[in-house]
Each structure stands twice: as C-alpha cells, then as structure tokens.
Amino acid sequence: MKTVGYIATSLDGYIARDNHALDGLESPEWEDPDGSDYGFQDFLSSIDAILIGKNTFLKVAEIGVWVYRDIPFCVVSKTLKNEEIPENLKEKVTVISGSPQELMDMLNDKKYSRVYVDGGKLLQSFIESNHLNELIITRIPILLGGGISLFGALPTDRKVKHVDTKCFKSGLTRSQYYF
Ligand SMILES: NC(=O)c1ccc[n+]([C@@H]2O[C@H](COP(=O)([O-])OP(=O)(O)OC[C@H]3O[C@@H](n4cnc5c(N)ncnc54)[C@H](OP(=O)(O)O)[C@@H]3O)[C@@H](O)[C@H]2O)c1
C-alpha cells in the first residue's frame, strides 16, 4: 500500500492561518483560467481511501461541500465527538485513531493500494515516521507570513525525489515528490 499527500501551500509553506482560515489560499484569483480543478478529481480517481486529520475534517464539515464521492473516508481522531459530525456526513465517515504504523496496519487489512493522507499534523506524523511515499504540493504565489506550516521538525534531514512540476497560467505550480 502506498500513501500520498495532496495539499496546497502558500509560497512560504503555510496550509492555513493559525485560526484555520483558508483565505489567501482559496480565492477566485487563484482559479485556473482554463477552468480546471488543478487535477484534484483526477487525483481522487487514483486513490481508494482517504485518511484525514480531525481539524481538516472539521473544516471540510464547516465548508459543507462534499467532493470525495463514495471513497472510504476515515477521520483520524481520539477526541472527535459524534455531535461534531454533521448528520449528512455520519454515514460517510469512519472515525479511527492510532499511530501512523497502527493506521497503516488497519488500512493494509482493508487491501487498499493507494491512500490519500490529508491534514497538517497527520501528514507531519506520517513524514516523521517514514510512512509517506509521495507528496503532491500545489504552491500558491502568496506569502502569508505565518500560519499552520505543512512541515515540522524532523530528527534528521530527509532527501526526496522530485518527479515533476507543472506550471499553471494562474501562477500556481504543482510538484510531485517521492519519499
Ligand atoms: N491548504 C490545503 O490544501 C489544506 C489541506 C488540508 C488541511 N488544510 C488546513 O490545515 C489545517 C490542518 O490542521 P492541523 O495541522 O491541526 O492538522 P490535522 O491533521 O487536520 O488535525 C490534527 C488532529 O488530528 C488528530 N490526529 C490523529 N492522529 C494523528 C496523528 N497521527 N498525528 C497528528 N494528529 C493526529 C489529532 O486530534 P485528536 O486529538 O482528536 O486525536 C490532531 O489534533 C486545517 O485548518 C485545514 O483546514 C489545508
């Protein structure tokens, strides 16, 4: 089973503001003039399960638009309360918890082949414990100057392999790396 992150950051590496607001990263000026979704739905077609951190799930719930089709969707949390899950999403989500290794074991048992890992802290834990295989980063040409960082501290340097970078007319770039 392979794990892959697919995430957008500011040029200075932030995935949200400290209060979890996404303004600056999500605004009409960053839409693709060619009308594409920057490959997100194609990416979803390449994965067979989603693992998402609690705070990212709460943002998805707040936004209220479900883009994840019927792909198995697991929220990783020890503290998420049933009442925090909107009624219309209760059937769609499974709440699980565990270390990255325990989560991998659970997903391996389900025979998934490619799992999308989403969320800041969750991705950091997968990177730190060497459980992330691939990362696709869409960089938005804005400096936020602070916020929630995609990357965290590591015990040692980690070299990754650059696979491809695509440039869009809007100024966004999407890079793929293998870990
Ligand atoms: N720009 C983008 O493309 C993009 C993409 C994704 C997210 N975001 C935003 O970025 C922010 C991410 O929030 P976040 O950094 O707090 O991360 P997160 O990964 O979404 O949520 C972190 C929470 O997940 C739970 N968790 C369970 N297992 C974990 C593990 N192994 N490692 C870490 N956390 C684990 C913990 O909650 P419990 O204490 O309940 O266990 C933890 O507090 C959100 O505001 C989201 O909207 C932006």
Image (cartoon, rainbow, N blue to C red):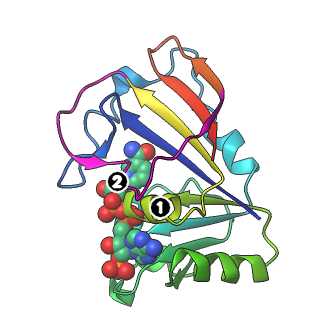
Q: Give coordinates of residue 142: x percent, y percent.
A: 29, 24
Q: Nearer the viewer, residue 111 or 38?
A: 111
| Magenta stretch in the rendered image | 141-163
Q: Residue at x 39, y 57 (%)?
A: 120
Q: Is residue 124 left or right of residue 92?
A: left
Q: Give coordinates of residue 94: x percent, y percent.
A: 56, 81
Rendered image quadrant of residue 19: bottom left
Mark 2 surroundings within 10 Å by alpha-carbon count, few (fewer than 14), some (14 through 19), many (20 or more)? few
Label 1 near label 2: C-beta < 8 Å?
Answer: yes
Q: Main secondary structure of the magenta part?
A: loop
**What residue is shown with label 2?**
152
- Residue 174 vertical position relative to residue 168 in the rendered view, above or below: below
Q: Residue at x 54, y 16 (%)?
A: 168
Q: Nearer the viewer, residue 45 or 62?
A: 45
Q: Is residue 74 left or right of residue 10?
A: right
Asked if residue 61 shows in the view, the reply is: no
Amino acid type, mark 1: Glu
Q: Secondary structure at mark 1?
A: helix
Q: Residue at x 51, y 47 (%)?
A: 158
**What residue is shown with label 1?**
128
Amino acid type, mark 2: Gly
